[in-house]
Amino acid sequence: MSARELVVLGTASMVPTRERNHNGYVLRFDDTTILFDPGEGTQRQLTLAGISATDLTRIAITHLHGDHSLGLAGVAQRISGDQVPHVVPVCFPASGERWVRHLLDASAFDHHERVVLQPLTAAPGEAVPVPAVPGQRGGSTAGAPTLTARPLEHRIDALGYRLQEPDGVTLDPALLAAAGVAPGPDVGRLQREGVLALEDARVVRLEQVSVHRPGQSVAFVMDTRMCDSVGELADGVDLLVIESTFLHRDADLAERWAHLTARQAAIVAAEAGARHLVLTHFSQRYRVPDELPQAFEREAREVFDGGLTVARDLDRVPLPPRRRRPARP
């Protein structure tokens, strides 16, 4: 199983169907496991996907419409029932706090959950960092990815999220060999200390045998009409998970209800240079298999030639391999 992958729990929009559960997505990124938009039925979908409550390090909600949040009540109670030992932050648009609190106290249960609320407010054009909290597992170590939020344009306050791994360096085997550093303990010593003295009195420094390692990134863009934040979130990402509620023949409905079409989502991916596009959040008006996934794939392929997944429930989509940068001359 990939250590960096998207697990799709559900792909329906407002109304679940026989084939599609309400929204729900888990992003596994090394020690970070974020549950995005837990719609109704998420607790069961987590079980089907083999993901436990203890795996979760954060819950991130884009907005407080039911298909993106009704499952929070069950997930919180599962976190409590399993007595998850670490803190699980829940971030969401600040204006939706009353609904979040209602969901977390929607029925009687023994409260053992360690949930911390993180209401977020982001002005247009602003990227808001989502901080780690004390007691949260992972997320605060050196080199850990950062999560930021930007405001989207929906019928209620909504946020899009971007997970960004910082750039780093990695040792290059060819440069190590050219410098005379043999595989084994010397490599580890060079990594720890940054410098290595060889038997012939030469000194090798870490920067001489390492190359730039671009950080990986994932963007989540759910319910929104086209706006600047959509492109800013998607800019250069390795994986873009984006709503495509309608086909473009129904663009008038998309505009009326503040959603995107598959064509619009694919244009965003193409213009932003996204490497892999995941279309999801489909209206119940489209039939299976007549229009899903075929019509959505055809529409996206008219404008986007990168990696493409028209998501189905319980799909697992690995992040593309890391971009490679040439070694220094």
Image (spheres, helix red, strand yellow):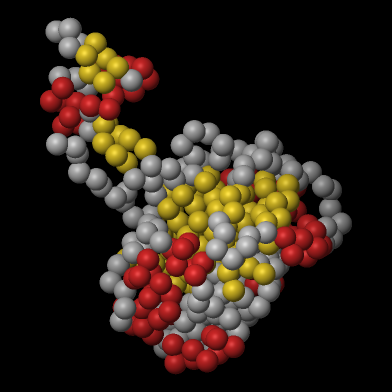
Q: In this view, does 226 lie to the left or right of 87?
A: left
Q: Give residue 75's quadrant in the image.
A: bottom right
Above or below residue 312? Residue 245 is below
Where residue 85 appears, x then y in whole percent?
69, 37
Of 8 and 163, nearer the camera is 163
308 w.r.t. 299: above or below = above
Dividing the picture into quadrants, the one containing residue 59 is: bottom right
Q: Which of the pair 223/107 is nearer the observer? A: 223
- Residue drawn 84% across the image and 60% down it: 107
Q: In this view, does 246 lie above or below 197?
A: below
Horizontally, is 92 left or right of 237 in the view?
right
What's the residue at 40%, 81% (across, down)? 263
The spot of residue 311 in percent (x, y) is: 45, 70
Where in the figure is residue 16, as x and y percent of width and height? 61, 77
Q: Is residue 129 left or right of residue 228?
A: right
Q: Is any atom of residue 43 visible in this view?
A: no
Q: Quadrant of the C terminus?
A: top left
Q: Which residue is drawn at 59% across and 54% down?
A: 128
Q: Indicate left or right for 146 with 61 as reference.
A: left
Determine if residue 105 is in view. yes
Q: Position of residue 182 (x, y in %)?
A: 19, 19
Q: How many marks?
A: 0
In the rendered image of this protein, does residue 235 appear above or below residue 243? above
Q: Which residue is at a point 34% across and 45% down the rendered structure image?
A: 214
